[in-house]
Image (tube, grey):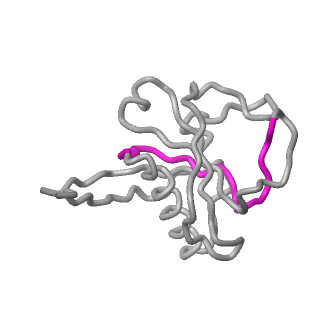
């Protein structure tokens, strides 16, 4: 028996790609990144465009793992608790969003502040733009 998983995708206001194909690529990459841990994400916040930097102890440096998208995801329990996991979805290149690998930070409260310290990482839905919900089917692995 297969399972259908409905996922809501968000961007910070003003960051939704205008190109529909690019938008689909970001959504697919975000889902692959969250599924890297074999979870069934229910909400994903795509926080960035492709970039090659990361922060180590508050200092921005070139990421040795390469170009990536920063995102956060929540499973069903995290939706209830108001928490999320931040991740990097690494890609082949700036113009090729082919999934390479993922890294994940620990779980944090949605109220955690972004690096500049003024805005929360996962704000209320009023401060986000949702893209159409997408269902994914998972087939049993037997």
Quadrant in which residue 75 is drawn: top left
Q: Position of residue 22 (x, y in %)?
A: 59, 72
19 in magenta: no
Across and down, in percent, residue 34 comes to 47, 50
Question: At x 19% / y 57%, what residue is drawn?
Answer: 140
Q: Quadrant of residue 89?
A: bottom right
The quarter of the rendered structure image containing the N terminus is bottom left
Above/below status of 22 relative to 34: below
Is 97 positioned to the left or the right of 3 in the image? right
Q: Which residues are magenta?
A: 39-56
Q: Quadrant of residue 115?
A: top right
Residue at the image position 56 percent from the left and 59 percent from the top: 101
Q: Residue 47 colored magenta?
A: yes
**Which quadrant of the figure contains the C terminus?**
bottom left
Q: Is residue 79 above or below residue 139?
A: above
* Residue 8 point in image, percent of width and height: 43, 49
Q: At x 32% / y 58%, what residue is drawn?
A: 135
Furthest residue in direction left, as rendered: 1
**Where does the image place residue 119, in percent across and percent down from the top left?**
73, 32
Residue under the point 60% across and 70% down: 97
């Amino acid at each position: 028996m297969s399972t259908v998983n409905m996922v809501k995708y968000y961007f910070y206001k003003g960051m939704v790609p205008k190109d529909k194909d690019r938008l689909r690529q970001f959504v697919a990459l975000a889902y692959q990144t969250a599924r890297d841990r074999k979870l069934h994400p229910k909400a994903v916040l795509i926080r960035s465009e492709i970039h090659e930097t990361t922060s180590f102890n508050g200092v921005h440096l070139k990421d040795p793992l390469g170009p990536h998208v920063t995102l956060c995801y929540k499973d069903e329990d995290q939706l209830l608790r108001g928490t999320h996991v931040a991740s990097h979805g690494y890609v082949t290149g700036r113009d090729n969003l082919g999934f390479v690998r993922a890294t994940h930070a620990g779980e944090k409260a949605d109220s955690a502040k972004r690096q500049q310290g003024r805005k929360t990482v996962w704000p209320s839905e009023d401060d986000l733009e949702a893209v159409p919900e997408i269902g994914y089917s998972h087939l049993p692995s037997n």
